[in-house]
Image: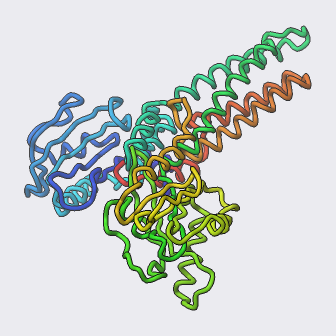
Amino acid sequence: MSIYNKQDLNDTICALATANGVGAIGVIRVSGNKALEIVDSIFPDKSLIKQPSHTIHFGKIISDSKILDEVLVSLFINPKSYTGEDTIEISCHGSPFIQQQILQLLVSKGCRLAKPGEFTLRAFLNKKLDLSQAEAVADVIASNSEESHRTAMMQMRGGISNQIAEMRERLINFASLIELELDFAEEDVEFAKREDLIRLVIQIKSIIEELLASFKYGNAIKNGIPTVIAGKPNAGKSTLLNALINEERAIVSEIAGTTRDTIEEAFVIDGIVFRLIDTAGIRDNTADSIENIGIERTFDKLQKASIIIYLYDASKTNTSELIDELSRFTNTNAVVIPVANKIDLLTKPNTIDNNTISLSAKDKTGIDLLKERLLEIVRKDKVKNDVVLTNLRHYEALQHANDALQIILNGIDTQITGELLAFDIRKALFHLGEITGSTITSDDLLANIFSKFCIGK
């Protein structure tokens, strides 16, 4: 995505800001130094150039004396706009034909169609948002649960940015004192007490390590928790999937090996998304080549799972058999929940241990206990800090910053020179700045980040 040529940033851009398709209204966004002039030329009812910012005006969009639509035009004059440029939003009727006609008219008058994320890119370059806040805009749009929305909103409002800014400011103050020492090297003075620097670095490392620890939880609520239902054929896996999502999604049959491929569905428990995967039954001997492919895919999904619900028939499985079956999962990183199904067929309780959940997927008894266990597993990774790390790029930058801070501590311990110490501090500052974009100079990195946005944002 080549939207980082300097001349491109001088263009006036336009795009549909609402979803494609028929709706009550559609919103077309225009931004750039000629936005007012271009829209004014197709909106004859009122001179937009003379109107104040943050006002809305009703009128017609005209093309060659033909009325395309009656619209509302909202004005946001720079710098008080999302992009920091003159920005106009045209609210028209939700006909795709009308929207396309207005966009074509805008292009004919001098606009360029915006590329993915270009409005938010301009907001970043014009310092309306830092980079972590800009990335959070995409997370807000993609949020699919209460928890992922809350986390994205907190980041968009500067949650992690504020913490990073505070850490960088304190480090910069120390770096400036050490740089000052270098100017007076011949006089052997120490403006920055090493004991104070040690305390500061330890404090910052503690904050960073808490943020790093939150990533597992943050990544889970952002992307959903891959949760695999595994077990032998006819254990009731498809019935359990249907019971959890409260929908007849998977085919249920008493014939062993009915499920030949994986079936995936998402469901939400208390604001957290679980990506539920029903798999082919695990068995060693089958002459069915298609079923064998399904079993291979089962093991592939198991390797990628965060949680494995291992379902077994409580009426047919004894303790030694269960232990042998669970041994298959010792090499996975997932949390395994043994679940005894078909308790409705038991004449007496048959719970093997306290970690096992007993239920009847058919009668939907015990389903709430399984949901509570799923929540417990996810929430044990939650940390006390309200700011939760959800972005892999931020995670990697903080890891590098933490490593650089450890090098500072090691350097103080070995009494390295002030010049080398200043270099190590600058390295830590660089990695912290990568998160908010204050040290980002690579157009390739910006292209990679903003190309994932939808067009019109």
Q: Is residue 45 left or right of residue 216?
A: left
Q: Is residue 101 left or right of residue 258?
A: left
Is 191 drawn above or below residue 344 in the view shown? Answer: above
Q: Residue 74's x, y, as percent?
A: 20, 38
Quarter holding residue 333 = bottom right
Colour scheme of the rendered structure:
rainbow
Q: Nearer the viewer, residue 106 or 94?
A: 94
Q: Residue at x 14, y 56 (%)?
A: 63
Q: Is residue 112 left or right of residue 357?
A: left
Quarter holding residue 439 = top right
Quarter holding residue 248 = bottom left
Q: Residue furthest front?
A: 347
Q: Nearer the viewer, residue 3 or 427?
A: 427
Q: Residue at x 63, y 69 (%)?
A: 321
Q: Residue at x 42, y 70 (%)?
A: 238
Q: Residue at x 51, y 66 (%)?
A: 314
Look at the image and tell me whether residue 314 can be seen. yes
Q: Residue 192's x, y, as percent?
A: 78, 13
Q: Nearer the viewer, residue 367 or 281?
A: 367
Q: Residue 120's x, y, as percent?
A: 41, 43
Q: Residue furthest bottom?
A: 287
Is 422 drawn above or below residue 328 in the view shown? Answer: above
Q: Residue 373's x, y, as percent?
A: 49, 48
Give the total number of marks visible in the rendering.
Answer: 0
